[in-house]
Amino acid sequence: MQFKKVIGQNGVKEKLRMAIRENRVAHTQLFLGPQGSGALALAVAYAQYINCHNKQEGDSCGTCPSCVKYEKLEHPDLQFIFPTATTNKVSKEPEASKFITEWKGYFLQQKGYVTQSGWYEYLGLGGNKQGSIFIRDGEQIVRNLSLKSYEGGYKVIIIYLPEKMNLQTANKLLKSLEEPPDNTIFMLVAERYELILPTIRSRTQMIKVSPIEKEILKQSLQAKWGESISSEQADSIAFMSNGSWNEAIEMVEQADESQFNFTKFREWMRLCYAGSDFYSINQLVQELSRLGKEKQKQFLVYGLKVIQNSLLVNQQLNDQVMAMADEKSYFQKFAPFINEANQSEMYRLVNDAVYQLERNAHSPILFTHLSFRFIDLLKKGRSRLVKR
Ligand SMILES: [Zn+2]
């Protein structure tokens, strides 16, 4: 992975390059950045740069023997440690070395932009299962340190999510982190500083990675999707994704679904507001009932978002409304009808409906019931508005 493949983060990149130029690369570094900021990608790019045989101005060459191996994460002097758990394949004593093929596959698929939940999903950990960094991983590191570097360059050990290290593992590593052998660099890549054991934290030099700048996110979205994403869409997504490349990608990928929820919810509210076209209401209820349970839930959760944002608009907190431009203009128009006459009832109604769907409610009845209640509640909201 070359620096140029890491989105934005120009300030950090420059700091890292400077450390090499001035020959003061710290032997134990903590890359601390929120999910989607690219902290791991940066660490790998840095490691590749340090070991590049033919360093270019500001980046690794990408073609020397070391870079070629690094690009595939196959360099013998690069070791990864990351959280794991038992799976169908490894039913006992999990540790990173047993999942290295999966890890490389996942990292390369994500172009370095990995997430904790994405990794667990890739591993096939069901439900709420979490990974850990085990004492066996600590022992593996210590064994590796006792070996000489294969290719004579720097040996790099990257520990992804040191937050997941238990006390036992940490104790095993304290001495190595404190004083690694010559030409050995530890790079810890973390998201939550407060969850890292203090004994580990105190042995590292921190490199802070910030959320990606909005303008750079926008450019990267347009570079990835070209014509299929409008400048205005890219703008809104860059704004809503909190500087996370992963969130931004997810939003683009779910754009069709979001568009469906938006269009249908707006149509539903218009029909309920008019309150007389029962044929169309019934058509819509049928259409919603044919969606899968998950989609129905997401549709209603979207409804909650509409109500919440309408309340923000009513309180003149427009700058807190996180939405695409067409949604925003809809919230502006819809908000006046959500007022003290009906707001809490509307919210409770939709929230309860999500709960009932989870309990396998019969969806045609549920959506019909909601429609009648909305007709009623929107009438109340309208008469309150007229009275003002
Ligand atoms: Zn190179």
Image (cartoon, rainbow, N blue to C red):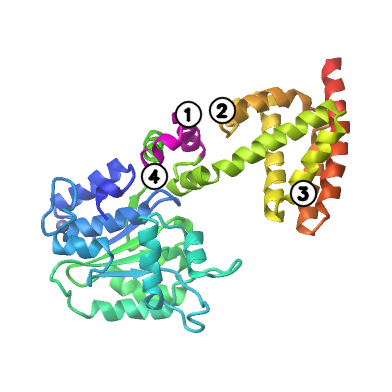
Q: Where is residue 262 in the image (x, y as percent from the top left)?
A: 65, 36
Q: Count residues near mark 2 (Cα–Cα under 10 Å), then give few for <14, some for 14-19, many for 20+.
A: few
Tag of residue 289: 3
Question: Position of 299 compared to 237: left or right?
Answer: right
- Residue 25 visible from this viewpoint: no
State the residue in front, 214 or 228. Answer: 228
Question: In this rendering, is residue 206 above or below 229?
Answer: below
Residue 42 percent location from the top left of the image: 31, 53
Residue at coordinates 45% horizontally, 37% vertically from top-left? 228
Q: Mark 4 points at which residue?
A: 210
Real-space Cα separation, disc 1 to disc 2, in angstroms:
8 Å
Q: What element carries label 3?
A: helix
Question: Decide: marks 3, 4 in contact (CB < 8 A)?
Answer: no
Q: What stretch is highlighted in magenta?
A: 223-240
User: In the structure shown, which secondary structural element does the residue marked by tag 4 occupy?
Assistant: loop
- Write down which quadrant ligand 1 falls in: bottom left
Nearest-to-viewer mark from 1 and 4: 1
Q: In which quarter of the image is residue 81?
A: bottom left
Look at mark 2 in the image and give the residue it sits on: 325
Question: How far is mark 1 from mark 3, CA to CA?
Answer: 33 Å
Q: Which of marks 1 and 3 is nearer the N terminus?
A: 1
**Of marks 1 and 2, which one's residue comes earlier in the chain?**
1
